[in-house]
Amino acid sequence: MEKILLKKSFRVKDLKIINFNSLWGYKGIFTTIRLVGNKPKLILAEEHIKKLNRDSSRLSINYKLSKEFLLNFINNNSKIKNYDHLLRVAITKKILSISLRKRNKEDKLFKAQIYRYQRVLPSFKNLQYKKIISLQKKINLKKEEIIFYNKNKILEGSTTNIICVKDNKLFIPRKSYYYGVTLDYLINKLPFKVQKKDINVKKLDEFTELLLVGSGKGVVSISSIKKLNWYRSSMKIYKFLSKKYSKLLIK
C-alpha cells in the first residue's frame, strides 16, 4: 500500500486532535479527493464534500465537513511544494480522520482481474473495506485493478467505476455499486447518453474498450483481462474522456 505522508484524527464533538485511526472497518463514510498544483487545487472538492456530508447524515453522523477546513488542514500541516496527491477523509460518529498520500501514476499497459464480490452497502462509500484492502495488497495498484462482479454482473473496481464501450456507445452497470464523483462529472460532460445496463462478465468480449474512472486514477484504459482473454481494440473514447478530465487539472 502507498506510504502515508500526513495523518491526523480528531474528535468529532470538539475537533480535538487524538491518536490517528484509519477507521477501516468502522461504521462510517469516506471520500478521496485529488490535489494538484502549488496551492493546492482540490479536484471536484465541492462534489466530494456534498456526497460525504449527505451520506454521513444518513448514518446519523452529526458533522458537516467544509472545503475551508480541508484547505486549512493542508496549509497548516503540509510542506509539500507541488501536489499530485490524494487526500482521504473518513468519518464516524466519534472520529474524523484525514490522511495524505502521493498519487500513483498508472502503467500504460494497465491490466485488470475479476473477483466475485459485492461491497457492503454498495451505494455508500463506506468504511467496510478490510476485504478489499486485503485483495489490493496482492497486486501492484500502479499496474492493475480488481473488478468486482456478483451473479455474473459487473459492478465496480476496487477503487474505481467502470465504463464499457461498444460501437461508440457507453454503458455502466445498472445498480449495486457506488456512483462516484468522477464518473458523475464525466458523464455530464458527454455529448451523448450513457446507458445503464446489467453487464454480464461472460460477455465482456463484446466491448472494445473498458475504462476505469475515479479520483485516484482519473481515466484509465484497461489493456487486458487475462482470465477472460479480453484485449482492448480501441482507445477512442478513452482519449475523449481523458481530455475532458484533464481540464480539471489545469493549475
Image: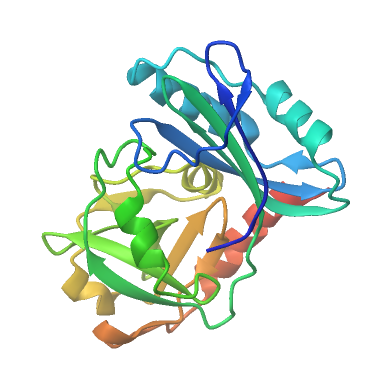
Measured from the top left, where is residue 86 in percent x and y?
64, 49
Judging depth in this view, the residue of 220 and 94 nearest the camera is 94
Left or right, 79 with reference to 238: right
Q: Relative to 238, say whether 41 is above or below.
A: above
Q: Relative to 90, say whether 55 is above or below.
A: above
Which residue is drawn at the image coordinates 33% and 75% (left, top)? Answer: 113
How many labels, in total? 0
- Extreme-left residue of the structure: 151
Which residue is drawn at the image coordinates 59% and 11% (left, top)? Answer: 14
Colouring chosen for the image of the structure: rainbow
- Extreme-front residue of the structure: 19
Measured from the top left, where is residue 155 in percent x and y?
27, 55
Left or right, 7 with reference to 47: right
Q: Is residue 172 visible?
A: no
Which residue is drawn at the image coordinates 50% and 78% (left, top)? Answer: 110
Judging depth in this view, the residue of 214 and 136 nearest the camera is 136
The picture quadrant where one finds residue 29 is: top left
Left or right, 157 with reference to 11: left
Measured from the top left, where is residue 168 in percent x and y?
42, 67
Q: Relative to 84, say whether 23 is above or below.
A: above
Measured from the top left, where is residue 112 in percent x and y?
39, 75
Q: Is residue 24 visible?
A: yes
The picture quadrant where one finds residue 145 is: bottom left
Which residue is drawn at the image coordinates 52% and 64% (left, top)? Answer: 1
Q: Relative to 207, say whether 248 is above or below.
A: above
The picture quadrant where one finds residue 138 is: bottom left
